[in-house]
Image (tube, rainbow, N blue to C red):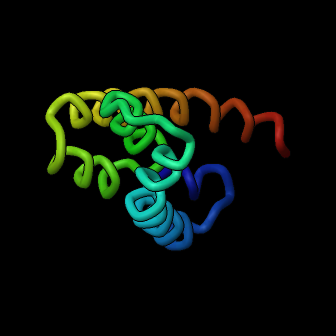
Amino acid sequence: MVSSQVGGIPALTAALAILGGIVAAVAGRKMLTALNIHDWRAYGLAAGIAGSGVAAAQVAARNELGAAFAAVGIGLNGILIGLVVPLVAQYWK
């Protein structure tokens, strides 16, 4: 797991990832609506990037296009984290 490789606590990382997904699922759509953003593509991408599976599942239950963009967001987030974290960890020490 990347967390343990960079000196983190895997259990804490998992718990915070789940908590982040729940927060994104609960607050994400309300926040985007408050910002006057009503496009399902934006909802999906934001849910995928910010909340991963929990928020993406909520969007998928409401709109197919949003679900596709949520999947893109999850993929982009995974690629970015997989590339950036090892580089930052290498220079952090």
Image coords of residue 43 (percent x, y): 38, 39
Q: Quadrant of the C terminus?
A: top right
Closest to the observer: 1 or 78?
78
Residue visible at 55% across and 72% down in the picture: 12
Image coords of residue 75 (percent x, y): 36, 30
Could you tell whether 24 is left or right of 8 in the image?
left
Could you tell whether 59 is left or right of 38 in the image?
left
Tell me which corner region of the image, top left, top right, bottom left or bottom right, holds residue 81.
Answer: top right
Q: How many marks do you count on the picture?
A: 0
Residue visible at 34% across and 53% down in the picture: 55
Could you tell whether 65 is left or right of 31 in the image?
left
Closest to the observer: 73 or 3?
73
Tell me which corner region of the image, top left, top right, bottom left or bottom right, holds residue 54.
Answer: bottom left
Image coords of residue 66 (percent x, y): 26, 34
28 relative to 17, above or below: above
Closest to the observer: 56 or 88?
56
Residue visible at 59% across and 51% down in the picture: 5
Residue visible at 46% across and 46% down in the picture: 33
